[in-house]
Amino acid sequence: MRIVFAGTPEFAVPSLRALVRAGHDVVGVITRADAPLGRKRVLTPSPVASAAEELGIPVHRANRLDDAATEWVRALAPELGVIVAYGGLVREPLLGLPEHGWVNLHFSELPRWRGAAPVQRALQAGEQRLGVTVFRLVEALDAGDVLSRDARDVPPGTSAGAALTDLAAFGTGALLAAIEALCADPAAGKPQQGEATYAHKLSREDGRLDLDRSASEVLAHWAGVTPEPGAFVLHDEQPLKLGEVRPVTSHAVSDEGGGDRGTVILHGGAAILRLAGGALELVRVQPAGKPAMDGAAWLRGRGGEAVLR
């Protein structure tokens, strides 16, 4: 099928590559404009732009799907538009330009977790089964008919970054199945069933962990906000980022009765954060204004014990 693709971040790249490998004619790629990255703020192409140029596919850079983007797509005469994490809305007349419209690979089992941060919000809620859905794009948010879906389990403590990387590859199967369904029946698709929930975009404050909650709840929250916007707690009134944590099974270091929760101790050479009903090892931390470091090394520098909140 003759396809125009819209996407921006790294986890949209597997879909683009899968379309090409499957023999589809990807005639153009729309991605967001080059962005300044790193300390020197060097203008850098998006991962999708880099992949498209490697594949020899024409690229249109745009932060909004405006009239210029619409005319660019019109000249390509695609049969189908495919969008994966582009970072902008597709509206008419662009929405109706391709013969078969647009399909979107979304990283949740719709209608659950419509919106900008489905994987992050699912993990924060303690969900361990994550899904993908390919649906027809309509003007209402993530509300179109479903063409294909799939899901898989992830272990507790899987970060949003790791989960998105996994789902990006996993979801290509659902994307290709959806296009096959459209080729066989241009009217394919079934209405979404069930209660819709909304996955709001995360802010920096979403990264603050509540240490009054149980160890499993804190781990789930950490997973949902890692790597972005980043999990943090306060130590001496300053933010302490928690780059990597893992659950601890030993009851000897857990807070079963209260009083010690939020205290970090050295136990077996590791920095252990005591919480209600369990504990977490602080593997990598980053104090305010300093580089990331080993959690145990940070704690030894504070006499082997610290209180977080």
Image (cartoon, rainbow, N blue to C red):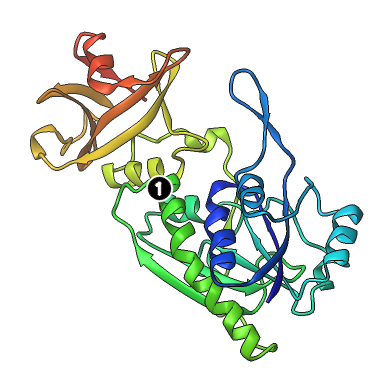
From the viewer's side, name the closer residue of 233 and 109.
109
- Tell me if residue 168 comes above or below residue 39 in the rendering: below
In the image, 2: left or right of 129? Answer: right
Regarding residue 37, the answer to whether it shows in the image is yes
- Tell me if residue 140 comes above or below residue 42 in the rendering: below
Residue sitting at x 59%, y 18%: 39
Percent coordinates x, y for residue 58 in the rendering: 75, 54
Residue sitting at x 75%, y 57%: 89
Label 1 amino acid?
Ala
Q: Which element carries disc 1, helix, strand or loop?
A: helix
Q: Quadrant of the N terminus?
A: bottom right
From the viewer's side, name the closer residue of 176 and 281.
176
Residue sitting at x 87%, y 60%: 70
Q: Quadrant of the C terminus?
A: top left
Which residue is disc 1 drawn over?
162
In the image, 187: left or right of 237? Answer: right
